[in-house]
Image: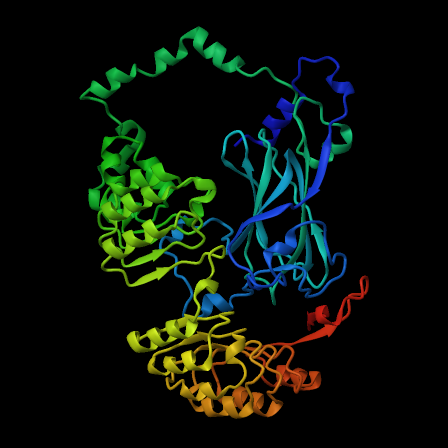
Amino acid sequence: MQCASEVMASFLWSSDDDASNREPKIIEQFVQDVEDFSSQYGSEISVSYTAFNLRGPPSNFPDYGDYPQAFVMRTYGTWWDEAPSASKNYMPQNNNAYTSQDFVEVSFKEAVYPLEVSVFETYNPGALVRIWAFGISTSSWYLLWEGEPHYAGDTPRIFSPRIKLISDSTRILRLEFNHKLLPYYTELDAVLLKGLQCLDIEIPKSLSRTFDEKPKPFKKGQILDKVVSSNLHEKIVPPMPTAIQSEKFDTDTVLGDFQRLPNETILYVMKYLDIQSLCRCAQVNRHFNRLASDTILYREIDLRPYWYCVHSQVLSTLSNRCKFLQKLDLSWCGSRRKIYPSSVVNFLKDSGTELTHLRMNCCKFVDNMVLRAIVTTCSSLQGYKITMYDCSCKMISSMDDVAIALGNNCPNLISVDFWRSFSLTPTGIRALGNCKNLQELDVGWCLQAGASGEWLGWLTGNELRKLFLGALRGICDRDLRALLPRLTRLQQLDLLGVRAVTPDICDAILDECHDLRLLDVSFCDQIPDAQVAEWREQFPRVRIKRSYQTENVNTAPNDLFLAPVLE
């Protein structure tokens, strides 16, 4: 990827004397379509809180608040990282400085050379950590900007970071987010892309503030011409055939005493290197190539941080080094058809026989052929995680059958997430009573299960750490009180929208659940604001979330879309 100064120089380099007299055509455009995303708070049967709301100009800005017309992702803070279902990094050394937890990929009507990207944030802003652009001519991803997350407070904003310039046009952007610093869900209202339609022009002074200081134009190739004309390369570097055939080719002068270390010591050092560094070590010399390709270094592989450059050939290259592979994360990889299903199948056949853990979240290459390969090849598999928001579970006519199968066949089940499974009923949830070691249960927005909460009494285990019951309005104090003796280890409880609960049961939960750290009582009509304020003083160890509704001062929305705002 070219740096901004190089691209600026190419902007200014033109053989047309009249170029300086032409004004560039700058296009400003909002999102035309949403191509992909990793999570959304809304469901596939509604537009509320979904990625679909990023299309077009902003609907709420400059109003601040929690509006259903915005795009909302599923997590905030560190609560999901602390839950039993939290994903552990297979190769933490691969992580970037700013780890991404979510992404959304959007497209625009016109392809442009990007000058500015503006993100309209209307609730808890500050989660954006990266902006990528997909180059049309190179079919490659370019990193336009990255920065650490920073909670910007209770105020709306248009976030327009200074981006790097690229010499390729784009109509597709990808935004990545980290929610760890946010007190509650963040919301995006729109994304604006400003760019030049072509590069055969001079940048006007009015736009110069957008970029770094511009160097003087230079003619490319001057240095290379001098090197070639002087034959300097022949004097310094021996001909490649001679270097390869030479038995005395010595690299000690480059590596010094490090290469004299025992192989075991070098391998011990190499196990702390990321995949990219291992590949570079393999190019140093034959000795390092053998060590950096040792199968012991490839028992756990996480390719998600390299999603932008992983393609089918990468899997083919790695397969020879992964004969003892046990854990593999391919999440987010395969964007824009860079990985073919057949390549994944071949990789699994060559290197997947000892796999115990496999993740393929948001992978476009997953199809029936890949799933069959997993079933037939990965006989030692203990954990398999896949999320595909463009292929939801709405085709499952009865989620009760899934819950009953889990209850009958997985007595040691630790975590299960049925969030927004509309076909789940109390019949299915009762079957989970067979799972004595269940630590995490999310049945939020499973509306058919919300008519009554009697099924809570069937949860017989004493290990629950996380219980999310959002929007199940039929649950009352009696149902929770029956479960309370088995909640001694509870850490997170979501009662958002459970309107029948009263302060009495919440008092009991706060008193008896000494490990409790999160309690969401938003939209619990029986709980007054004054009581919430008292709890916050009395139980400072617990983060108590409480929302109230306020009107959109600009548009006076329908009562259905009154905006909840976090205190």
Specify the quadrant of the image occupied by residue 49.
bottom right
516 to the left or right of 326: right
Query: Which percent across, then down, holds residue 82?
Result: 46, 69
Query: Which percent across, then down, holds residue 100?
Result: 50, 53
Residue toward you, 283 or 488: 488
405 to the left or right of 555: left
Query: Which percent across, then down, holds residue 153?
Result: 68, 62
Residue toward you, 537 or 477: 477
Tell which residue pokes out farthest to the left in this image.
Answer: 247
Tell which residue pokes out farthest to the front in this image.
Answer: 397
Query: Which percent across, then down, holds residue 73?
Result: 57, 61
Which residue appears at 65% of the width and 25% of the height?
199
Vertical relation: 553 (above or below) 324: below
Residue toward you, 412 or 241: 412
363 to the left or right of 223: left
Residue toward you, 438 or 343: 343
Vertical relation: 409 (above or below) 61: below
Report if residue 493 is visible in the image. no
**Which quadrant does the C terminus fall into?**
bottom right
Which residue appears at 25% of the width and 43% of the height?
321
Count of numbered circles in the view: 0
Vertical relation: 229 (above or below) 61: above
Report if residue 317 is visible in the image. yes
249 to the left or right of 179: left
Vertical relation: 142 (above or below) 83: above
Specify the quadrant of the image occupied by residue 2.
top right
Which residue appears at 81% of the width and 62% of the height?
554
